[in-house]
Amino acid sequence: MYAKYVRRGRKKYGPYYYKSIRTPEGKVKNIYLGKEKPKKGFNAKDRKNLVKLVLVFLFISFFLLGFSFTGKFLGTFYTVPVNITFNRSSEFVWSPETQGEITSLKVSGFFSGNGTAKIFLKTPDKKLLVLDTKSVSSPGVSVHPGITGFVIKLPENKTKPNFTAENQTIQPLFKKEVDQKGADRFQMTIESPLHSLYNSSLIYFNVSVTLNNATCVYSLDNTANKTMKNDTDRHFYSLENLSDGYHSVVFYCNNSFLQNHTQASFITDTQPPDIAFVSPSPLNEFFINNTYVQWNYSSSENLSFCILSINQTNYTKPATQNFCYFNLTLKSNQTYCLTGFASDTAGNWNQTETVCINVFYIKPEPELSVVWKSPENNSVTNKNWIYWEFEVNKKPSNCTLLIASFNYTMNINDTVCFFNLTNLSDNLYQGNVSVEFPETNLTLQTPSCSVVLPKNFTIPQNLSFSLLLLPPTPENHSVLQEPNLTLSLTSNFNLSSCSLLFNQTRIKMNL
């Protein structure tokens, strides 16, 4: 309560008593109380003339009310909790213990139910409406209605129990607030959708709450709320034909007293990835001269898993970003038909075209070489036959000896080819050899080898020789004092070999 004075010219008027209240719009409003300072308390002689305060609660149908009244009555402050439950139309009256002037009254609390409730301030001849629950648009939300600065004054003559007030019908100050402490008293769990990627346009919204008689709604991408169906503590809704892309959903749940909310985000991707072979290229009917083949197919988006099907055999591996790589060793001289499969990160699958290739493999051949063993090139022989022999570094399938215009098929032992050419007359014999190998049609032409059989060649019948003894020269049938004996044999023509028969043992001599 405040007091102020008013000056008009040189005169001062007052004091004027008033008190300040705050309106629903947040403005401060002064309420005039009169020129006389209100008395504190009361005296016994005024008691019979004072107004009796009665709060009347009128309930229609089922209703639950839990209000707390705070007021100042004749200098005494009261705080009275009222918790009432009615299942039919009823009236409940509460009266303060004392009578007198009301300087303030505040009502706060919650209400719920299928009906309505009204609260009146009543005297013997008048009734003021304090609260009508119809004016609250969302029952179940914690509501704090309040009336402040509501003043009832006795008439000057105090002969009749009557009163005046600022307004005959008081509009309470409603403020809808979420009970944050209440939000901690029940939990909301999103079962679907999770913070994930979905490959379906059908999305299930499932929420479970630890709250009885709850009502849940959802808002998808900031659109209007939609009520969810429920089965006890589970609330659900199925949404079809949802577009691809990023989505955000907020779930709101409340019952008569409490409210909570939670949200989730998810992505839908219903389109399969585009995939195509990159290598080898070209693909269809491609001949690969190698049994080790690298397969590679790719997509314009990141892939998750890859499957390569080759002649109905599947090879699997994780993708590398937007690529699928397979390195395989295939059998030679076979045809393979292949199809690539891949899934994107949402689980959508797609496949490439089917391609067929022929695989063959030619093992690199070592460089072929020939080593002549017989006869010695450009040699001379005194025999009427020549033994031809050479070796190659790979087993041949056929060896042919070519001399003049004649072909002779040679014998083969592993990598050695040989042939004995007999009944020869004196002449020059130049041989060439053709070698074939089983895996290919390759033919190796060997270098030529020449052998001369001299004309009019006769084998000598008599050989003249001389026995030369190193000093001291022993006589015939003599005994040598030294263990070494040197014999020398000479002839009137070139010799190819010499041997000495000594005590029935043939000893090869040096030339």
Image (cartoon, rainbow, N blue to C red):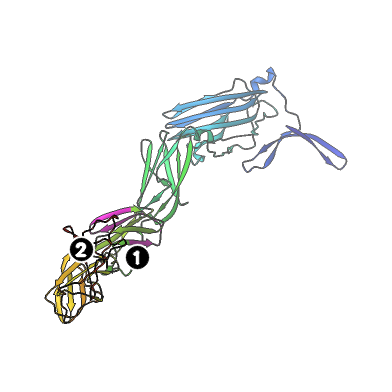
Question: Element at badge 1?
Answer: strand
Q: How many marks?
A: 2
Residue closest to the far right: 10
Residue 76, located in which quarter of the rendered image?
top right
User: Left of 141 or right of it: where is 243?
Assistant: left
Does the magenta segment cover residue 38?
no
Which of the pair 445/451 is nearer the observer? 451
The residue lying furthest to the left in this view is 423
Q: Residue at x 64, y 42 (%)?
A: 26
Q: Which residues are magenta?
A: 294-316
Q: Which mark is residue 500?
A: 2
Q: Earlier in the sequence, mark 1 or mark 2?
A: 1
Neighbours of disc 1 within 10 Å: few (<14), some (14-19), many (20+): some
Instruction: Give the Cα separation between the discs numbered 1 and 2.
Output: 78 Å
The percent position of residue 206, horizontal first and vertical second, equals 38, 43
Using residue 320 as the reference point, say whether residue 155 is left or right of it: right
* Majority secondary structure in the magenta region: strand
